Image (cartoon, grey):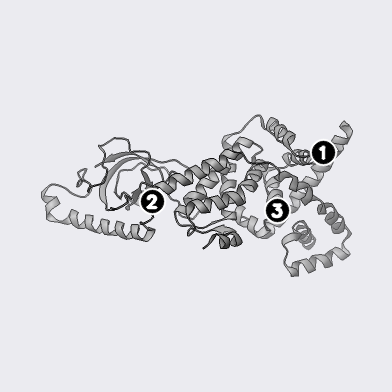
């Protein structure tokens, strides 16, 4: 009986059976009247169902997506490859760690976790505490980065997507992908406003937390 | 990867420029994804939003240097569709269905749409993916997170349900004449 049910399932999905499965099904059909009837009934179904593919999508879908692609292209900085960005970020982390442990910051009263940070290098934007971040500044980091307090990076060209809910002050490095300069500086994120959404890649895969910052403390 | 290779492979590789890649994806999948979501959600507005969301997600995916394949697109669209349906427990689904059926190209298409509407969302989805979009049981399994044997069994059940409902629809239609 179980075997018969398996043949019936094969009958419903004949199109993608392996040659071996197909041969076994043909053999079964030759001696099973019930399956022959079912095969005849199923034979016309695909042509009926194909009628469900007849609706034209609204034209604004394409327009909106292409407008978004155009916007992304304008913001994109092609000279910064992913590897290069990671390398520079690592260098930034190391330099900052050295700076924090050097006698000068301590002499100035700057310690890790304190709310005073060095000023940003030329070309960077550091906003007063509580100020709204321009909407084109977003975070690129995985939620685990937020949770564990590891360093993340903020890139101008990122676009808003899905993320976990995190609102925890943490030290981050960020960079600005300008055409001719790239560096890093520290900022103290006071609040993070991130949308909660579905991870399209399914569970277990890396979820890129991309959301707008609502506050910075330079 | 050049554009022709991408077409043959059924996927867009991040080496293609992001704009080129997303244009190719729109050419290839916009139509089928929209109809898939119409079948799944039975709501043109939700279908439209979900398709747009899916292609913007694809754009982001390409921008991060990842490859976009058909199965990935459908998975994103499917998840978004399920999500939207959860949030929009709409009362006027029957009205939406009649609008869609009225716009169908033939009386048969309208009849099929009404029959499909009586199936469970999962049954509609499986029939559409297998029979209309031509995915294999294995591909569908990877989209919905099920084993191939389970997909085959579910398609069988969906086919039986569809046959039952479609025949009943036909009889009702005859009786109404």
Q: Where is residue B39 in the image (x, y as percent from the top left)?
A: 68, 42
Q: Which residue is depicted at the point 61% across and 62% down? A: B8
Residue density around tag 2, few if under 14, some if 14–19, many if 20 or more, within 10 Å = many
Rendered image: mark on residue B130: 3
How many callouts does the rendering have? 3
> What is the distance, in whole Å, between disc 1 and disc 3 at their CAs?
22 Å
**From the viewer's perspective, is A155 left or right of B86?**
left
Q: Is residue B72 above or below residue A137?
A: below
Q: Which of the 4 image quarters holds residue B167?
A: top right
Q: Where is residue B131 in the image (x, y as percent from the top left)?
A: 72, 52
**From the viewer's perspective, is A17 left or right of A209?**
right
Q: Mark 1 points at which residue?
A: B169
Return the chain for callout 2: A
Along the viewing direction, whichever of B28 and B88 lies nearer the viewer = B28
Marks 2 and 3: same chain? no
Q: Which of the 4 image quarters holds residue B139?
A: bottom right
Task: Label 1, secondary structure: give it.
Answer: helix
Residue density around tag 3, few if under 14, some if 14–19, many if 20 or more, within 10 Å = many
Marks 1 and 3: same chain? yes
Q: Is residue B72 in sight in this rendering?
A: yes
**From the viewer's perspective, is B78 left or right of B167?**
left
| Cβ–Cβ under 8 Å for marks 1 and 3 | no
Q: Is residue A194 above or below residue A78?
A: above
Task: Label 3, secondary structure: give it.
Answer: helix
Q: Position of residue B100 (x, y in %)?
A: 70, 35
> What is the distance, in whole Å, between disc 2 and disc 3 at their CAs?
37 Å
Q: Where is residue B50 in the image (x, y as percent from the top left)?
A: 57, 42
Q: Which residue is depicted at the point 82% across and 54% down? A: A43
Task: Label 2, secondary structure: give it.
Answer: loop
Along the viewing direction, whichever of B68 and A111 lies nearer the viewer = B68
Rendered image: mark on residue A141: 2
């Amino acid at each position: 009986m179980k075997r018969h049910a398996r043949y019936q399932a094969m009958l419903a999905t004949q199109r993608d059976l392996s040659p071996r499965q197909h041969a076994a099904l043909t053999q079964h059909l030759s001696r099973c009247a019930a399956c022959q009837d079912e095969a005849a009934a199923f034979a016309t179904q695909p042509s009926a169902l194909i009628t469900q593919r007849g609706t034209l999508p609204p034209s604004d879908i394409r327009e909106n997506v292409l407008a978004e692609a155009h916007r992304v292209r304008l913001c994109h900085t092609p000279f910064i490859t992913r590897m290069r960005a990671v390398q520079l970020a690592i260098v930034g982390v190391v330099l900052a760690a050295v700076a924090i442990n050097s006698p000068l910051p301590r002499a100035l009263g700057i310690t890790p976790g304190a709310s005073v940070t060095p000023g940003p290098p030329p070309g960077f934007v550091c906003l007063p505490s509580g100020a709204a971040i321009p909407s084109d500044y977003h975070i690129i980091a995985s939620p685990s980065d937020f949770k564990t307090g590891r360093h993340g990076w903020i890139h101008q060209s990122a676009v808003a997507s899905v993320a976990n809910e995190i609102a925890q002050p943490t030290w981050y490095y960020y960079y600005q992908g300008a055409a001719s300069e790239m560096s890093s500086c520290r900022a103290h994120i006071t609040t993070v406003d991130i949308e909660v959404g579905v991870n399209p890649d399914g569970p277990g895969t890396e979820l890129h937390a991309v959301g707008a910052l609502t506050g910075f403390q330079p | 990867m050049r554009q022709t290779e991408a077409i043959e492979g059924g996927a867009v590789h991040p080496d293609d420029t992001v704009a080129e890649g997303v244009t190719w994806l729109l050419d290839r999948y916009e139509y089928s994804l929209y109809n898939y979501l119409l079948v799944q959600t039975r709501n043109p507005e939700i279908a439209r939003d979900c398709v747009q969301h899916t292609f913007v997600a694809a754009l982001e995916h390409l921008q991060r240097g990842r490859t976009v394949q058909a199965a990935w697109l459908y998975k994103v669209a499917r998840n978004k569709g399920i999500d939207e349906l959860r949030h929009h427990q709409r009362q006027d689904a029957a009205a939406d269905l009649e609008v869609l059926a009225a716009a169908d190209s033939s009386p048969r298409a309208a009849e099929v749409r009404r029959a499909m509407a009586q199936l469970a969302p999962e049954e509609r989805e499986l029939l559409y993916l297998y029979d209309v979009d031509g995915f294999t049981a294995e591909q569908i399994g990877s989209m919905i997170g099920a084993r191939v044997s389970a997909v085959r069994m579910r398609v069988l059940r969906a086919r039986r349900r569809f046959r039952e409902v479609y025949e009943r629809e036909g009889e009702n239609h005859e009786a109404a004449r």
